[in-house]
Amino acid sequence: MAFGTSFLAPGRFTLVAGPCSIDSEQTFLKTAANLKEKGVNGLRGALFKMRTHSNSFQGLGFEGLAILEKAKTLYSLPIFTEVTDPRQIERLDNYVDVYQVGARNMFNYELLKELGKTKKPILLKRSFSALIDEWIAAADYIQKEGNKNVIFCERGIRTFENKLRNTLDLATVAYIKQNTSFKVMVDPSHGTGSRALIKPMALAAAAAGADGLLIEVHDEVDKAQSDELQAINSMEFGEIVVALKKILPAFGKSL
Ligand code: PEP
Ligand code: MN
């Protein structure tokens, strides 16, 4: 699918949202419909999950591809989904608009090299232990294979602070914008681990110069199979959109 001209275009702020993992067709399509109404630019949802515990939900896998296809047909939105293994690329390629590389795989150079041979944009999440230079070096692995379209995503790093899931490093967002030509998105969901903190950090990300946000939204959160504590609903997402519309012009951007 071709992206709309507004997707990550200069002066525009891009909103990508959806559940952490796609857990059922019904809830994914319902959430997608509500997000479309709120003006989202892309839909997120993982089929392959890298969970800390092997007995946690691992994602629907390829069985969920039909759900992605349905959402794309119904809502004409670019699909962001995580690829966790180079062997998945061939089958995912017809369904995915942007490949997400998760924090756990930012250092998986064989995966990065294979993604560098694809023609799709790569959303490269920062590992929770990655230095700025290591993050940029990871992007080089993708670009060296020919794919220059790497989008960075700051999603929080591990620090001594343990009250929150991660420490969202917005100074690094400003640094990347000032010192590289990469687009940078911010994920305030993983960056905080707490739904109450998503709106303030979303607005702070816009002020720091981010090009867009990746937010976990689930409209039947009691049924969510992963990251339910950091998922907001589409109404709350709509409130963020309203607030962004007010503040973005101050930074020379619009939705
Ligand atoms: C996600 O976006 O759902 C995810 C797993 O994020 P991260 O790789 O940043 O932990
Ligand atoms: Mn998640």
Image (cartoon, rainbow, N blue to C red):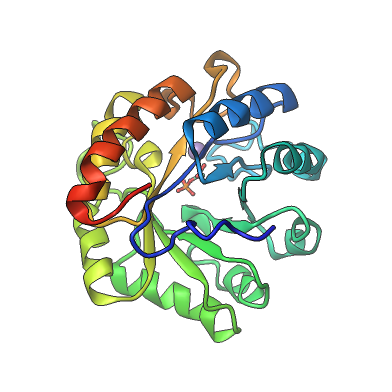
* Position of residue 132 measured from the top left corner of the image (x, y, whole percent): 29, 68
Residue 172: image quadrant is bottom left
* Position of residue 255 measured from the top left corner of the image (x, y, whole percent): 38, 47
Asked whether residue 19 is in view, the answer is no
Number of numbered discs:
0
**Residue 154 vertical position relative to residue 193 in the rendered view, above or below:** below
**Residue 104 vertical position relative to residue 25 in the rendered view, above or below:** below
Foreground: 54 or 228?
Answer: 228
* Position of residue 44 measured from the top left corner of the image (x, y, whole percent): 57, 42
In this picture, residue 252 sits left or right of residue 60: left
Q: Residue shown at 37%/65% (left/top)?
A: 10
Q: Quadrant of the N terminus?
A: bottom right
Residue 203: image quadrant is top left
**Residue 57 vertical position relative to residue 96 in the rendered view, above or below:** above
* Position of residue 104 measured from the top left corner of the image (x, y, whole percent): 49, 54
Asked whether residue 109 is in view, the answer is yes
In this picture, residue 249 sits left or right of residue 211: left
Q: Residue shown at 58%/78% (left/top)?
A: 147
Q: Residue furthest top?
A: 222
Q: Residue shown at 30%/24% (left/top)?
A: 196
Residue 198: image quadrant is top left
In this picture, residue 10 sits left or right of residue 95: left
Q: Residue shown at 61%/76% (left/top)?
A: 116
**Residue 35 vertical position relative to residue 156 in the rendered view, above or below:** above
